[in-house]
Amino acid sequence: MDEKRLVRSSRMLSRILRHEPGLVGVTLDGAGWVRIDELLAALAAKGRPLSRAELDRVVAENNKRRFGYSPDGLSIRANQGHTVAVDLGVAAAVPPHVLYHGTADRHLAAIFREGLRPMSRRDVHLSADTETATGVGARHGRPVVLTVNAAAMTAAGHEFRLSENGVWLTDAVPPQYLSRRS
């Protein structure tokens, strides 16, 4: 599998496992899992064949660790980022004192007025480092990194969860906990 096919396959799996399982005719269970044999058969039936070895490579080499296998190795799911209703069973965790969010500068006025909201996703995504946040922001335009006072949010009763791939999740970030990183 060449690099271009690897990236295309990863994007396709993200779309199916996070947003549109019906695109290929699969159904995610309540925790976001789909059986691998069912997924591979559905992909082949839609003219998008992917072997188990290729799937293994996509899972192993995705730099954002977007996908994970079930403990028995029979199912796959996206680790976070869903727009479809799933319960990933991610337990509450105590975050570092500060987290970061990458965005584009054109969104700042609305963010500082309304805070961070999940928009079409189930959660707001935050990172523990500025490099990741900068990369996320760059996908949307000129990147801006916002600092989230996670310690104050936690003290005020807001809950955080840490996904399997290291993304911090929360329901929303009110504007009083945000500042622009210099």
Image: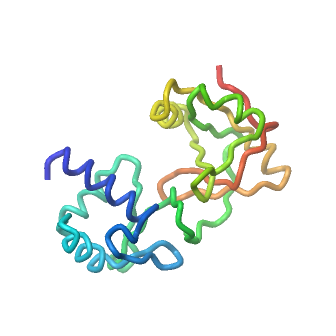
Q: Residue furthest left?
A: 1
Percent of width and height locating residue 29? 48, 79
Percent of width and height locating residue 105? 59, 25
Percent of width and height locating residue 164? 49, 60
Q: Residue furthest right?
A: 156
Q: Does residue 49 appear left or right of residue 92 in this picture?
A: left
Q: Which residue is drawn at 18% across and 66% down?
A: 47
Q: Could you say which is closer to the camera, residue 158 or residue 17?
A: 17
Depicted 64 relative to depicted 77: above or below: above
Q: Does residue 57 appear left or right of residue 15 in this picture?
A: left
Total marks placed: 0
Q: In the rendered image, which quarter is residue 90 located in?
A: bottom right
Give the color scheme: rainbow, by chain, secondary structure or one colour: rainbow
Q: Which residue is drawn at 49% across and 33% down?
A: 140
Percent of width and height locating residue 132? 49, 37
Q: Could you say which is closer to the camera, residue 175 or residue 149?
A: 175
Q: Which residue is drawn at 55% across and 71% down?
A: 86
Q: The C terminus lies in which quarter of the figure?
A: top right
Q: Does residue 114 appear left or right of residue 74 in this picture?
A: right
Depicted 88 relative to depicted 63: above or below: below
